[in-house]
Amino acid sequence: MKKVLMISTDRKILDEMSSTALRMREYAEVFGELHIVVMSKKSKVESPKTELSDFGTSDFKLKLSDNCFVYPTCSTSKYRYIFDAVRIGRRIALDFKLSASDSVVTTQDPFETGIVGLSLAKKFSLKLNVQIHTDFLSPYFVHGSMLNKMRRHIARYVLPRATSIRVVSERIRSSLARDFRLSTFDSITVLPLYSEVVHVPVESSDRFPQFEKVVLMASRLEPEKDIETALSAFAMAEKSSLNTGLVIVGSGSMEASLSNLAQNLGIDKKVLFLGWRDADDLAHIRASSDVFLSTSLYEGYGLSLIEASRAGLPIVSTDVGIAPELLPSDKLAMPGDIDGIASLLSEAIHHPERFVVEPGFISLVTYPSKDDFLSKLRQSLLI
């Protein structure tokens, strides 16, 4: 029976009803104990839906299952995240007697959580597993972001000191092979994310009767998703496409500015911002759509592409993440290429069959069952 100490920044774990919390419970099933430290501000966990029990003098823990526990850092500032996570991680290691023989630290990224994990691994002589979910070696990752430039430097310090590394795509593994000299390279596991297939009845109702064709995006509204380019490309493509609408599912910091951009481009009547939707609702929205569009500047994987492909939607995407494993190069656009994306989008609207992903390609970048995924996850931690 193995003990796993996970360092994360995903606040959705704190919501017991979220799909993320459910996934953590499933992860815990293959371990003896799963302890998750979540970097979060105190205000984020003061919710009546979240019952927290005392862990210590000033710390709390949330019990997701009999062997899965979550510890929010309840930090007063984001600048305290690393210090608070290390402090709580040390208490967990001592209280639950984590040792080199039966325990491992795993971090969500090689950046801030990586620093925490490395500190704890050194202090208690534990194995360190580092997860990489984004293509941080992409030139777009550091473009215009001093924080991401610092994160790349942190990764160069953390990764060579890891016992094992898990990446979500072959693209990231190849990037590491090209740019890093890692003694642990043979211990890099390519483990894509697992997602359940949500089946929607064929007779699913038309959600958008005002449009003859619907282009769907499902994305966080953040700079790296480059929704500005999507709006500009759609404005060009829809001129040659009769009564086509763009439906955007997701939320984020750029929602207001993107809405303003749609208005400035004169397409605000053809663009719908639906906000965040749960998996079931999103599945029904896919069933009412005709083309799926992704314009990310960089991706580690691209789960939304898999989900759209499984639903039979034609895909228009930039050349990021697993996109080149799903579509030929002449059906992919370079990140930020408005003209290229507009051209492909127009073609996909009129000739969707040219952009449908073959089922065989989908099976190459996914796992056939949840049990298979969980088994590979356990192996990736080298325990």
Image (spheres, helix red, strand yellow):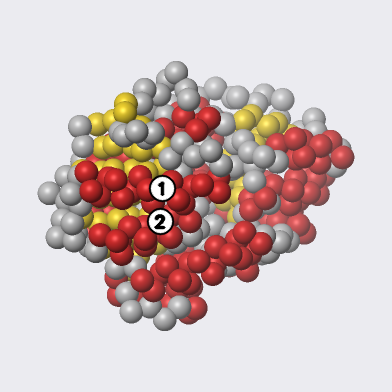
Residue located beneath label 2 in the image: 116
Residue located beneath label 1 in the image: 85
Neighbour class for label 2 at 10 Å: few (<14), some, many (≥20)?
many
Q: Is residue 292 left or right of residue 36?
A: right
Residue 356 point in image, percent of width and height? 53, 51
Camera sees residue 24 = yes
Neighbour class for label 1 at 10 Å: few (<14), some, many (≥20)?
many
Looking at the rendered structure, the secondary structure element under dot 2 is helix
User: Where residue 265 is drawn, which disc sits there?
Assistant: none
Residue 373 point in image, percent of width and height? 28, 50
Which of marks 1 and 2 precedes in the sequence?
A: 1
Residue type, label 2: Val
| Residue ID at (63%, 50%) | 225
> As rendered, which of 142 and 147 lies closer to the eye?
147
Q: Give the spatial CA distance, label 2 vs label 1.
A: 7 Å
| Residue ID at (60%, 61%) | 148
Is there CB contact under 8 Å for labels 2 and 1? yes
| Residue ID at (26%, 37%) | 68
Find the residue positioned furthest to the left. 1
> As rendered, which of 317 and 111 lies closer to the eye?
111
> As rendered, which of 105 and 319 lies closer to the eye?
105
Up-down relation of residue 281 to residue 383 (above or below) = above
| Residue ID at (40%, 56%) | 116
Find the residue positioned furthest to the top. 48
Residue 140 point in image, percent of width and height? 64, 64
Q: Is residue 381 left or right of residue 41?
A: left
Looking at the rendered structure, the secondary structure element under dot 1 is helix
